[in-house]
Amino acid sequence: MTRATKIVATLGPASSSADVLERMILAGADVVRLNFSHGSAQDHIDRAALVREVSRRSGKEVAIMADLQGPKIRVGKFEGGRTTLVAGQTFILDGATTELGSNERVGLDYRDLPRDVRAGDTLLLNDGLLRLSVDAVRGDEVHTTVMVGGELSNNKGINRAGGGLTAPALTAKDMEDIKTAMSFQCEYLAVSFPKCATDMEMARQLANVAGEAWRHKPALIAKIERSEAIPVLDQILRASDGIMVARGDLAVEVGNASVPALQKRMIRMAREMDKVVITATQMMESMIVNPVPTRAEVSDVANAVLDGTDAVMLSAETAAGKYPVETITQMAAIALEAEAADDVTLDTDFTNKKFGRIDQTIAMGALFTAHHLGCKAILALTESGSTPLWMSRHNVKVPIYGLTTQVVSQRKMTLYRNVRPLLVPPHGDRDTALVAAERLLVETGALQSGDTYAITCGEPMGYPGGTNMLKVCRVA
């Protein structure tokens, strides 16, 4: 059985050597994430070149996701690098000071915090581990009382319970980083902290302009990590190519208990709107230091798979952990087991559904036909990758092969659930292309003599959005 759920692995100090990266790709990494919160522009350019080289060498194409840092809503630095706050003590967040912090006050990277909060607000620091109650705002100073104490170190994040911080999603650094990401033509651009569709539309415009020299347009992923994004999720989805369920900052803003239901809702909405969805944050956190995951982590990954996520993501586990390759191997095994237990509800998916496009109707017809005939595979000859994307929005146990002449489309399809992208040479003649497609799948072992399969293509060939033919064949 081939795994349907994809794995996104973050590159970092633990995984930046060619040897480790190659073993990660062969273990099951489908998309490599470059985290722009760390490292210089040249670091990312060098790592992207390494990914392309190792991918070519390993014989498995992977996509690159450039993940923008977003606004730095953080405290400043402390004398000695850290301090300890005790419940009941007072503590000042000072937007004007540039001095090192102490047990009494600390500066802010986010200088607008005093204008965003008022007395009675709750501030959550260091992923919600510390909780401060705002007593008063006096000029550039936010006076607070510590409700839940603990250690606070340099540059830890700040969230306001319930959201409401006005920091823009795209900073000046992000705008420069978009140019860097386009210089190596990343397939996916992840935008941090978008609050509305306009944030995504602006990111798309900047990316398209920056990529114009290479005629490259990346797919955009909206990271849902602000409470303000939840009421306008449908609008953000329409302005994006996919979303990331970024459970870390989101949990801090909306509360841990709200996240599981939101995760299910976001995955369902993304699939219904023909968008991709990634589930992220602390999925295999214990494997940063341990060679096996906890049972709770196994259940977490399995539940995301059963929810229908396209991909599960690893962050520090592969970027800085001791077991990057083993973590991917474990995650792949969990996904396979969960998929084997998943039910197919294809018929009910189509109840009362209407399809207004010919190519989308052909895609749905191929799914329905392949499922009920027991086909071994669905072959989709595609330029843009849209037909395999539509097919992948429905749970079917028949593997989907996206056959394209465009390497960019091949790489983008690596993120689509249950889609195996393959690069094929161009064929101007339909019959020649169909014969070549069958031969390729036989050579790869996906099909053998006597197998039935469904195949879709467009005629005339070579035009995006032109899929208009469905054929059912049997291998001689």
Image (cartoon, rainbow, N blue to C red):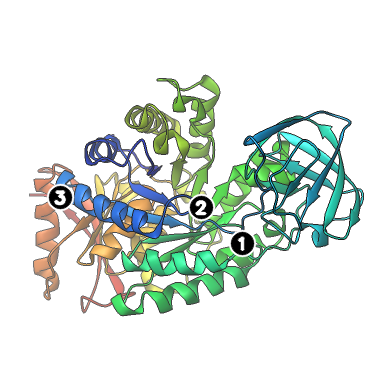
Depth check, front residue: 357 or 408: 408
Q: Give the residue drawn at x 33%, y 46%.
A: 30
Residue 450 shown left or right of residue 307 in the figure: left
Q: Earlier in the sequence, mark 2 or mark 1?
A: 1
Confirm or deny contact between disc 2 and disc 3 (CB under 8 A).
Answer: no
Q: Give the residue drawn at x 58%, y 66%.
A: 171
Whether residue 369 is visible here, answered yes or no, is no
Quadrant for the N terminus, please.
Answer: top left
Mark 1 lies on a secondary structure that is loop
Q: Quadrant of residue 208?
A: bottom left
Query: Which numbered circle lies on residue 194?
Result: 1
Amino acid beneath label 1: Pro
Mark 3 lies on a secondary structure that is helix
Calculate the distance from the C-alpha at mark 3 to the C-alpha at mark 1. 41 Å
Where is residue 444? Give x, y as percent.
13, 45
Q: Tell me the residue that label 2 is attached to.
A: 349
Q: Are there few (<14), some (14-19), or many (20+) residues within 10 Å of tag 3? A: some
Mark 2 lies on a secondary structure that is helix
Q: Quadrant of residue 261?
A: top right
Residue 260 shown left or right of residue 96 in the figure: left
Q: Tell me the residue that label 3 is attached to.
A: 441
Q: Quadrant of residue 66?
A: bottom left
Calculate the distance from the C-alpha at mark 2 to the C-alpha at mark 3. 28 Å
Q: Are there few (<14), some (14-19), or many (20+) residues within 10 Å of tag 2? A: few
Whether residue 358 is visible here, answered yes or no, is yes
Amino acid beneath label 3: Leu
Above or below 334: residue 13: below
